[in-house]
Image (tube, coloured by chain):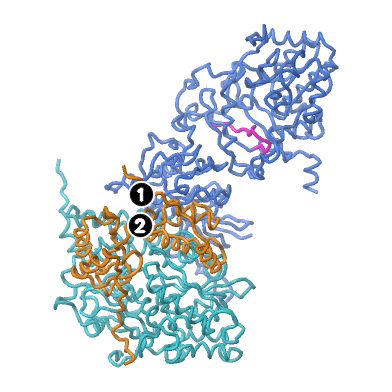
Chain colours: A blue, B cyan, C orange
Amino acid sequence: MPEIIIDDKKFTYDTPGKVLPFILDHGMDLPFFCYHPSLSIPANCRQCLVEIGTPVFDRATNSFKTDENGEKVIQFFPKLMTACSQDMSDGMVVKTHVSSEKVRRAQKDTLEFILVNHPLDCPICDQAGECPLQIQTYKYGPEGSRFEYKKVHKPKRIQLGPRVVLDAERCINCTRCVRFTHEISKTYQLSIVSRGDKNYPSTANGKEFDDAYSLNTVDICPVGALTQADFRFKARVWEMNQTPSIDITNGKGTNVDLWVRDNLVLRLTPRHNPHVNDYWMPDSSREAYRLFNENRISRPEIKLDKELVKTSWNNAKETIAEIIEAHDTKEVLVLGSGYASVEENFVFNQFFTALGCGKASFVPHVVEGAGDGFLLTDDQAPNTKGCELLGFRAHTNRTFKNALAKATVVVVLAEDIVGRELANAEDLAGKTFVYFGTNNNTTSKDAQLVVPITCAAEHAASYVNVDGRIQRTFAAKETVYTSRATNLEMSTGRLDRFGTKFDNWRTDKNKVDCLPVWEFLSELAPRLNQTLSYETGKEVLTAVSSSVDAFAGVDYDKMDTEMGVVLSTPETEEKTA
Amino acid sequence: MAIDFQNYKTLIIPQGGNLRDIKAYEKQGGYKALKTVFDARESAWTRENVINEVKTAGLRGRGGAGFNTGLKWSFMPKPDGGKRYLAANGDESEPGTFKDRVIFEFNPHLFIEGAIIGAYSIQADAVYVYIRGEYRSWIRFMEQAVADAYKAGYLGKNILGSGINIDMYVHSGAGAYICGEESSLMESLEGKRGYPRVKPPFPAQRGLWGRPTTINNIESLANVPLILNMGAAKYAEMGAKTHPGPVLYGISGHVNRPGVYEFPTGMLITDLIYNVAGGIRNGKKLKALVPGGSSTPILRADQIEGVSMDADSLRTAGSMMGTAGMSILDEDTDMVDFLYRISHFYHHESCGQCTPCREGTGWLEKILKKIKNGDGEMRDLDLLLDLTTQMEGRTVCALADAAAWPVRHTITRFRDEFEARCRKSVFAIA
Amino acid sequence: MQINKIMSYTFDKEDLKQIDAIKAKYPTVQSATMPVLWYAQDKFGHVNAEVQHLVATTLDIPESHVHGVATFYTQYYKKEMGKYVLDVCTCFSCQVCGGYDMLHYIEDKLGIKAGETTPDGKFSIQEAECLGACGYAPMLQVTNDVYVNHLTKEKIDSMIDGLKEDKLPEYEEILPPQLISKD
């Protein structure tokens, strides 16, 4: 196998590639700004300069030249080379800052240059704390500045588009954002404008940067030049906890991180998954933070005199039990949802079928033309496939209406049937309607009983995306009944680890009074002489995988280590065949 | 061996009036080389033979880097059925350089003939002639000349019945020094911002529109018919051994008779200044010389004795041939003002792609402005020198080097003048 | 209050024919960006935001691309300029031959500074980088076109007088000293 020597250590490689990613993939550090693994390589920041040498080949003897010790003679390029653009070759010798004073000096020099016209406004910059420029300046930069002149002034606080704000003075011209719009989103909305040290990225004269993926440029901006309009000045990064999760706003299952402070999700960012979304995520998916924070149903509600009023959990359970007891279970319509996780749908179905109700069904939510062939899908729900694999009947709007007409009791999990115009108040009139949901909506308004359930940010549960990949969320925020101190799966933030020994999540007001479906139904079960006992999503999934063939062999550990698991569905079978 | 320059008969600068008229050029034996190549191409002038002839003639690029033109042509890969291009570099933006315009104006067909032969040798389908946008008058000359060459059957389909098709297009720049850098020139031809490309891949592998491309300077291509007409052996004997052939010397600055002169390489600088260009104006003394455009290291008057205009001699003297655009500075020249203005140029022209150049050029200018204004301190001079080492060799293209060299060499070679302009650093003693 | 001149920028049939001819020179449409910007500037006198938009829509290429290109190259006027733009070279070859004196003379004469336009919209002055006429310094270029070499105050006076009457300076043929003419 070809080998490469980096700072006197020998490595072998089997796939050809560039030096920089190889160094990074092997746990070594090398500073860089403009390089991005999924974009073209302009080698413009000049931060990853290294010494590169190759063995000298002697044509006369048709072999490599060796010195008196039998070692291959290495000839170094006279100039430092950018590791990002340098192809590896057999026998190549690379010296980074670890072993080369020349490289150390170059890294310091480049950083000094970058900082010449950088405003150094870290204390008021959103990027501070997760800023590659800040981090690398601390690690590799000069101690002070020798620049004693007025910096170049460029446009500031430019609302480039509805979601992205530009501070051109902070920009270091890495062109990642421009390359993103050229190579990934392909809207070509950004270009570097002007020339020399007046360069900055911009749209054409006053045009909106309304790219459906525009916020990815904020993620990949290595400085605070591009910031997210609705996150600016909301929080410092070190105050938030970063929890892996799954996008629930469409069927792609984009891997995301939830950034949570004090039980509020403040932003979502994409999490790398080469099988699903690479490093990217659509702007619309970032709106999910509103679903997690705003307009949540907190505490069960019951309709009294046409008004929903808060009630106790005991009363909620008792009410459901009474409804079941008072009706023929054959007349109960049990509606699952692609908007709820595999675990929730499974338990929901398990509970009601055990009572003699018919198997749960669902109404897929597909909007033709909403997808873009990239990360937006026609499928609006995150778990349509999961419902299918659980064997739920997929209703059309019409068959659902028919089923609804026949039912006297309607139990709905998380589906906004009124909002989706699957049913209206008239259709529901005269029926007993119980709604399990996360957010207040037109459907919850029409229910006789509303049971608040945990959302994707509050429980660990899994979703099967349109391609049959099952992936899971983690609890990222507390409910009234959970505590991050006792749930060891909840991620800790930098302040937890380094900042304070007191809990910096101070208020209780952001905790929602809700329960996971499985927990609520497990508590309800004894009242209806049922046995059902699930405490966590993990336990539910174990039950799923042992009882539903499509999920056989799947567990959370496997999902975590393999970045999701592709379930064997008729479609995926076909693909692999 | 001294060159008998008084009796030198120019080859590029026409003898017999302006040869812009194709008829006049043909009358003088123009397009003879092309006809020979195309007529006898089955036998004597195969593509390999033309390339070898140019290679053995020792023609070195006249754009500044001085690379062997024939060797450059031989880098083109074997044809794969796709398009191949020749780009002629007439961006001519290096301050102090004004020689290609003489070809455009007075002998454009010599260049066109050379370019067609070049395109034939490297099997290019088209030649793109990139001319700086400021040269609008000269672009018109070239467009006319190209149209005439098409009409005469030297360009287009089935040239001279050879079955070979070569097109030629004139492309106007729009004000960017960087587009004289070959990869930036290609970006500009592709309609983009003139950002130099990372190499490899080299133009011969991936050039214009992703296809194999060779880029040659206008004057280099104009030399090709000369080589074929006189033979490589005779050409190789002209001027300096390692850098042969006729060169257009653009002489400007404080001389009595500035202008573009043609002589073989290897002319003594002193001959060029005193005997060709009529010596220093107003009876002043020579102070310094920039031998080949603003980026080439400046030489003091005491450094030019016996130095000739060719790559080797100038390297020994501590400079470079560049474009042979010689700027002569007299004893009254303020070196601080002079260097400030050069730094201003590079700051203005840096494309802004690479960090060291984008930020370094501006910083150099700012420091020099401070010194020029009398606010400089001694430590600023060392900072300037330090910055040049931080810039040099650290960028995609050579603009950072071009910006760094004049600063380094003007300061080291005229340090006393710079020190005289600086305030003495005062350190407070506590 | 001054009423703004309302001007709509369009290419007519003849323009589009010319633009098609430009496009035919290159294997990609994008390559036509620069020549079409030139074409537009010749027609409209500048390539401001609206003209850039027109070029982008005519060529069907991203407007941001056209904007990026227009702002990279200094010869494209991104805003309306005076009818005659005097690009006075002050780069070092001209500098050492009195380029700045000429610039300042023109500035004083027209009562504006480099980078400004006279109130009557007739003249703009710009400080230019090397224009490639080093042997004929000091010199200037009129509106991206004709060069005026060997500047003197007298020559500037007569040139500006001429331009005031819309008489463009004539192209000056400067023969290389070694060129031997026919006769």
Pointers 2 and 1 in contact (CB under 8 A)? yes
Please say whether residue A415 is visible from this viewpoint: yes
Q: Is residue A108 left or right of residue B169?
A: left
Q: Quadrant of the N terminus of chain C?
A: top left
Amino acid beneath label 2: Gln
Asked where in the image residue A376 lies, by quadrant, the reply is: top right
Magenta stretch encompasses residue A449:
no
Asked where in the image residue C93 lies, by quadrant, the reply is: bottom left
Q: Quadrant of the C terminus of chain C?
A: bottom left
Please say whether residue B194 is visible from this viewpoint: no
Q: Is the residue marked by circle 1 packed among few (<14), some (14-19), or many (20+) residues within 10 Å?
A: many
Q: Nearer the viewer, residue B60 or B393?
A: B60
Residue tagged 2: B390
Q: Which residues are magenta?
A: A242-253
Work out whether A49 lies above or below B270: above
Residue plotted at (59% across, 30% down): A288
Numbered disc 1: secondary structure? helix
Amino acid beneath label 1: Glu
